[in-house]
Image (spheres, helix red, strand yellow):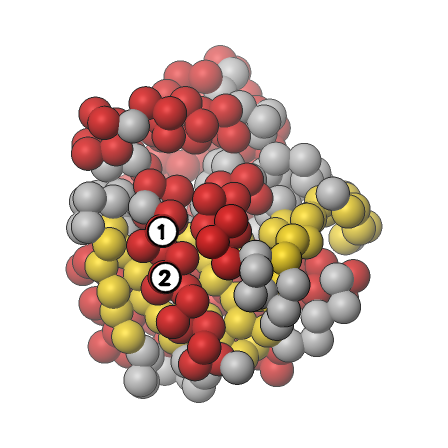
Amino acid sequence: MDRIKSGDTEIVYRVMGDGPAVVLLHPFPVNHEFWMPVVNALAASYRLVLPDLRGHGASGAGQGPATMQKHADDIALVMDAAGVQRAPLAGVSIGGYALFEFWRRHRERVTGLALMNTKASADSAEGRAVRMKAADDVLEQGTEQFFLGQVQKVLCRSTRESRPDLVEGALRMMRKTPPASVAAVQRGMVERPDSMETLKTIAVPVLLVTGDEDEITGVKEAELMRQNIAGSELRVISKAGHYSPWERPQEAAELLRTFLERCR
C-alpha cells in the first residue's frame, strides 16, 4: 500500500497488474478490497489503481465533511503519484458521485467512465435528513448496527441468502471504517451537487452498470443517465444488488474488459 498527503489527511492506495492504467473507486462504506475479485480477472491486462477513498478503510477523513470536491482532488493526486496522466475510471455508488465531480474538475484526465450502481441526482430533502441522522447516530452509538443495516440494503436477497461469505466479507471491509469517518462521508454526500446537467457534457465512452436487484439506485436511475449521456451504454447484471461488482465479479469484469477496449 502507498500513501500520499492530500490536503489535511493521508490517502492510501494500491496498484496491481500490468498494462494500461485504470482507476477503480469503491462504494461507501467499504474500501479498495471491494474490487479484488474483479482485479483478479483484469490484472493480467491492466494496471489497476485502487484508492481507499477519503474517510474509507485506511484513508483519513480530514476535517469537516468529506465532500465530492475533496474526493475528486484526492483522486487526481493518487493518479499523479501512480504516474497516470489520463485513464478510464470506474466508480460504484459514491465512487460514481466522485467521478461526476472529477469530470467537472479534471476532465482532461478522463478517457472513459464506468458509472456503476450510482445516480446523478442529488439527495432529496428526506434523503439528506436520513444521512445526517445516520452520521449523528454512529457518533453516539458506534457503527455496528449501521453496518448491519447497510448489508441488508447494498447486497441483494439472492446474495444474502446464498453467499454468506460475501455478506461477511462486506461487513469485514465496513468495520475498517471508524465512526468519525462514516459521519464525515455521510455529511459529504449530503452536500453533493446535482449532476444531471453534467451528464450532458460527458464526451468520452461511458458504460452504465446496475444490478437487477439494486434497490438503492437500480435500473431506473441508470436509464435516466443513459438518456442524458450521448453514446452511453447500459448493462444490467442479474442477481446483483447495489454492490454488483462484489456480488457478480466475473460478470462485472467482463463488462469492464469489453468497455476498456473501447477506451484504448
Q: Which residue is mark 1?
A: 250
User: Relative to 36, is 161 above or below?
Assistant: above
User: Relative to 66, is 221 above or below?
Assistant: below
Say what secondary structure mark 2 lies in. Answer: helix
Q: Amino acid at mark 2?
A: Glu
The quarter of the image holding the N terminus is top right
Q: Which one is nearer the viewer's eye here, 210 or 93?
A: 210
Q: Are marks 1 and 2 in contact (CB under 8 Å)?
A: yes
Say what secondary structure mark 1 lies in. Answer: helix
Can you tell which quarter of the image residue 144 is in? top left
Residue located 46% across and 73% down the image = 260
**Residue 155 shown left or right of residue 60 in the figure:** left
**Residue 202 shown left or right of residue 76 in the figure:** left
Picture coordinates of residue 36 (x, y %)?
52, 44
For mark 2, does the 10 Å Cα neighbourhood hold few (<14), some (14 to 19), or many (20 or more) residues?
A: some
Q: Amino acid at mark 1?
A: Gln
Picture coordinates of residue 172 (x, y %)?
50, 24
Find the distance from the CA under tag 1 to the CA under tag 2.
6 Å
For mark 1, does the 10 Å Cα neighbourhood hold few (<14), some (14 to 19), or many (20 or more) residues?
A: some
Can residue 73 be seen in this snapshot?
no
Q: Which residue is mark 2?
A: 254
Residue located 22% across and 59% down the image = 236
User: Relative to 216, is 161 above or below?
Assistant: above
Picture coordinates of residue 3 (x, y %)?
78, 46
**Residue 235 shown left or right of residue 203 in the figure:** left
Residue located 61% across and 72% down the image = 20
Residue located 48% across and 80% down the image = 263
Q: Which one is nearer the viewer's eye here, 154 or 103?
A: 154
